[in-house]
Amino acid sequence: MAKGRVSIVVERCKACGFCVEFCPSHVLALSSAFNSKGYHPPHVVHPEKCSGCDLCGMYCPDFAICATKIDAKRADPAKGGAK
Amino acid sequence: MNTDLQKTNLQSADPRGVLTGIHFMDGDHACCEGALAAGSRFAAGYPITPSTEVVERFASRVPMVGGTFIQMEDELAASITLIGAVWGGAKAFTVTSGPGFSLMMEHIGYAAMTETPCVFVDVQRGGPSTGLPTLPAQADMMQARWGSHGDYEIIALCPNSPQECFDLTIKAFNLSEEFRVPVMFMMDEVVGHMSEKVVIPKADEIEVTPRRHTHKSVEEYLPYATNGDGVPEIAHAGEGYNFHVTGLTHDERGYPNMTPQVQDKLVRRLQNKIRDAADRIAMFEEEKLDGADVVVVSYGITSRVAQRAIEAARERGLRVGKLRLITAWPFPEKKIRELAANVKAFVVPELNLGQMVREVERAAGGQAKTFAVSHAGGGVHNPEDILKVIVEASKCRKS
Amino acid sequence: MPEILNILDNDLGKNLNNDDFNDDDVQNPVEPFLRSDRVPHIWCPGCGIGTTVNSFARALLESKIDLRSLALVSGIGCTGRVAGYVKLDSFHTTHGRAIPFATGLKLANPKLNVVVYSGDGDLSAIGGNHLIHAARRNIDLKVICVNNLIYAMTGGQTAPTTPDHSTTSTNPYGVFEPSFNLPHLVEAAGAVYVARWTMFHVRQLTRAISEAFHKKGFSFIEVISPCPTLYQRRNKLGDGLDAMKDYKAKSKVRNGAPTSEVGMTMTGEIIVGKFVDRERPDYQTMMRAQYADSLGERFVEQSEMVCS
């Protein structure tokens, strides 16, 4: 059960890979898709592992990603918060 | 923010800074008193002859009127420390002479670009380079106008007495606030070091131009938008406006925007806000211009030497008028052009090898001849030398 | 807050969870501190400057600084552009002169918290004189020096911090002049707080900036940061991510280390930590004390200097 969730502003990403490398739970991978600038943004491959620690957000030089803790209400599966 | 200040254009000087009375003081000290009377409570400086007495006096006076003087590590620092102080809310100035003035050029451009109201005092000495540290010249006049790179306009005033060092320093601050422009206060070593009677009026007789502080809300405020007169309203750091100031070409939000279109709009506005007001800014002293054959155009200490030559020429029956430039920049070209239609010649003595004379010649536009009376600096003219040129000029035929 | 987009529609993109992407409640903690209309920024992929801004923003949150009182001053260069991206009263000044500008700002309005955010070349070469004198005077400034070991904005020229033997565009056969050890320099000049972290140490950097905010006097935080486009590439050190891995592997935390021992080499270890944390009266405290002592009741505090 995920404790956190990741948000990505795809258009800001420059695909440095910091978030993928330094995510302690290996939640992310770079996508093969492009954003409009031609970069490969990350995407969530293991959403269930996200702890919401926001290390990805702290490392992201482009302010393109952040992770938040899921509170109890949002963790309600009926609301689609936790996967 | 004191919003009452916005209601009137002018306000009275803060009496704490005004040393009301009749004094015997030199031009450097009078300049300092002018700055204090104008409301300046911040100066940053670096020692350089023959200007240092201005900040020495400021350093001694300002702790008793509530302000700061800081002696910086060089003129590069001094000239931007004062700009920082302005954005912190102060009225600020620095004082220097030739070599230091050269070092300050980048920040004169920065002040022009960021529209920072401030005053640069240059007590001119002989150059180039270290030149004549203790002796006068007027050879920084073109540097004052053109010294920083790029297109911009400044205002420059030229006092010719300690009394004017006081009066015009106030004027310099007032103009800087009105137009949000750096004002060059172009003294010279003789005016700086000569002692004369200086009358400092009561504070309520001194008019001070308040800062063009915005009264817009944070949401409405655009730091570099204007209300038609080409001069934007300012906000200070710490007031919640979250504004951005940059020396890069910027749009009305103050954001860098390096397109030819934004450059054109910005740089033309910076230029036109001064040029369009040139007639209003222009101050000069005139004497017997009506019917004159020759007009002597001078400024600063040279105007006092020229006075003797003018009077000697009149004693010989020559019709000589006097035009003393108090505002050197923007150059009062309209006045010169009007005179040029009627006079035979201009005689321009100055303590350089020909600077403002070029402006006179340009403004005259071939309608009248122009004679330079150059002097490399280190002293003042012999009035005889000016007289000779006046006599020669009187003989020429009307163009 | 910009719109969170989901434009990935290929196979891998299907793994993305759309619910997570379009959530109005989710806001990057750095967002309130940014001029969002100016992002994406100009910094290269893998450049570390943006990451330092994350730490800065989080330090502002942690230290509960009144943002209204905060002014940020930058010089020229890549890091000089920070001023343009933060939603604060921010000043992008001339090359090397961020510190004297900040000095004027602080002295004119002592209530301001003034941060100088600039690069190694700006602060220690063209601005080197101001750096040491502001430290000597102990002006109450928080200086964040992003050290990417090179002049980046102008195309990769040698900086005073460029390590020995590395290659730059102006030392194409290798740098042979010794580099500055900035913590040592500013400690000797009088800084009250001196720390160095790399961009890998985001949490430590955040803490250091928070600590500096609670320090009165000249604080200096050096952040070693990758320049993949110029320093890394010219020296065959890989990209930004390689630099980060390198920082992780080679950094050695030595809080309180003598700053004389923290000089950097091109491939050697990077000593990081809080090196100096001491008390000295700051410039304005000394100034007021001196005036009060010499002038007694004739001394007038400058609080009313600010004109409206």
Image: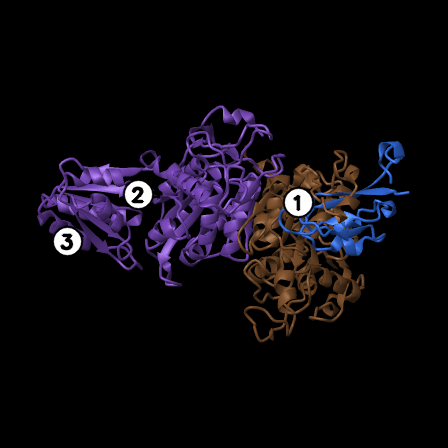
Chain colours: A blue, B purple, C brown
Residue denoted by label 3? B388
- Of tags 3 and 2, the one toward the viewer is 2
B241 w.r.t. B398: above or below? above
How crowded pointer 2 is (Cα within 10 Å; few <14, some 14-19, many 20+) is rated as many
Residue denoted by label 2? B331
How crowded pointer 3 is (Cα within 10 Å; few <14, some 14-19, many 20+) is rated as some
Marks 2/1: CA–CA distance: 52 Å
Identify the subunit bearing mark 3.
Answer: B
How crowded pointer 1 is (Cα within 10 Å; few <14, some 14-19, many 20+) is rated as many
Classify mark 3: helix, strand or loop: helix
Q: Check whether the beta carbons of the residues at disc 3 and disc 2 lie within 8 A of each other.
A: no
Residue denoted by label 1? A11
Which amino acid, by three-letter code, is at mark 2?
Answer: Phe
The lab-note entry on whether marks 3 and 2 share a chain reads: yes
Quarter of the image where the N terminus of chain C is located:
top right
Q: Position of residue B71 (x, y in %)?
A: 54, 53
Front residue (pair C203, B137):
C203
Q: Check whether the beta carbons of the residues at disc 2 and disc 1 lie within 8 A of each other.
A: no
- Of tags 2 and 1, the one toward the viewer is 1
Marks 1/3: CA–CA distance: 76 Å
- Of tags 1 and 3, the one toward the viewer is 1
**Residue C187, quarter of picture:** bottom right
Quarter of the image where the C terminus of chain C is located:
top right
Which amino acid, by three-letter code, is at mark 3?
Answer: Lys
Q: Say whether residue A4 is left or right of residue B13.
A: right
Q: Say whether residue B133 is left or right of residue A71.
A: left
Report whether residue B388 is seen: yes
Taking the spot 77% from the left edge, 67% from the top edge, the residue there is C250
Taking the spot 20% from the left edge, 37% from the top edge, the residue there is B338
